[in-house]
Amino acid sequence: MMKYILTTDNLTKKYGDKVAAGNINIHIREGEIYGLIGRNGAGKTTIMRCISGLSYPTGGSYQFHSSDSHGIGVLIESPGIYANRSAFDNLKIKCIAMNCYSREYIENLLNIVGLSDVGKKKAGAFSLGMRQRLGIALALTGDPKLIVLDEPINGLDPQGIAEVRETLERLRDDKKITIMISSHILDELGKLADSYGIINNGELIDEFTSQELAERCGKYLTVRTGDNAKAAELIASMGIHGAELRGNYIRIEDCLDKNADITRALVNGGIDVHEIYTTNTSLEDYYLSLTGGKKS
């Protein structure tokens, strides 16, 4: 059984009369990636700032349970990078401040985040993905067992997202570092995280593991045809319920074993079948089912 590295007990933060986060009870297991999900203004950053020591809770508390750590590493908002300095120099400045400087130590950090080959190139000339990875290296300075990352992949191109994702997976799998991450890109978070917490209007409305997500969400059939409206009517006439038009496809939550029958009926009805396959319900689907509306 995995043990918790960080928990909160009714953690609350108010700004005047406004409750930014209320009675939050989060449980982060050691060695996992924990994804925090919510709209802009839902309270994600507030929670992260509180547990990172950047803001004081107005109620409740948080407990850091690791005894062999130097604290919590943090990357909230934009990385604090000196644009006219190299990646090595940026890390050197922080290492000196934290009394852990050595050339070997910095070179190891650069290697961990995939920046070992950037040489003396100034950080201001880095791509956004490279700057985010340098920000992660800065968060790793001092060897924390938990790092907190607020929206580290938002705004990145697909290559940058893949690079950051691979970096975080290495930190978890090879370095055994626990990671708390927030992101609006739920498809990517669904590939990465082991556990999740959903924040809505300052409240934690659900907390679950990736395995529990799979068990709760189930599967559905995705059907794409040359005439989805006509196809949906034909499928309904077969006595198959729960067929919904969703943009450019039909979603069927009933009769998942009827792929062949549905395909045959559509072809015989003169409807071109472009695709029909079974789909696992996504993290985004589940999030929207709990919160309603659209994700930000």
Image (cartoon, rainbow, N blue to C red):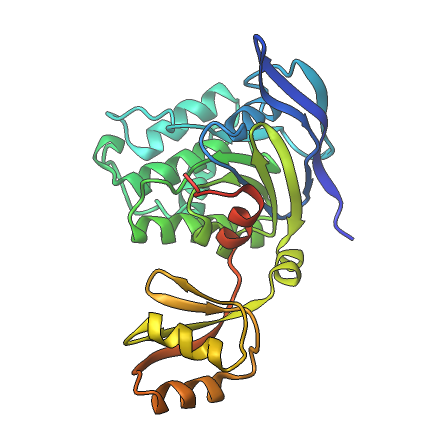
In this view, 98 is above or below 210: above
In the picture, measured across the screen, residue 145 lies left or right of residue 103, that is right
Classify 13 as above or below 295. Answer: above
Residue 234: image quadrant is: bottom left
Identify the residue at horizontal 25%, vertical 38% (top origin).
126
Q: Is residue 172 left or right of residue 117?
A: right
| Front in this rendered view, residue 51 or 145 | 51
Q: Residue furthest top?
A: 16
The residue sitting at 44% across, 54% down in the picture is 187
Q: Position of residue 24 (x, y in %)?
A: 67, 29
Instruction: Please tell me which residue lies in front, 105 or 187.
Output: 187
Q: Of 93 and 262, which appears nearest the observer?
A: 262
Q: Quadrant of residue 61?
A: top right
Q: In the image, residue 67 lies at what x, y percent?
A: 74, 33
Residue 92 visible in this rendered orientation of the protein: yes
Corner quadrant of residue 27: top right
Image quarter of the C terminus = top left
x, y percent for residue 110: 40, 42
Asked whether residue 35 appears in the rendered view, the answer is no
- Image: 108 above or below 78: below
Image point (45%, 84%), residue name: 262
**Residue placed farthest to the right in the image?**
1
Residue 229 image position (x, y, % from top left):
34, 70
Q: Is residue 44 left or right of residue 82?
A: right
Name the residue at 59% across, 20% down.
Answer: 53
Viewer-side residue, 26 vs 69 = 26
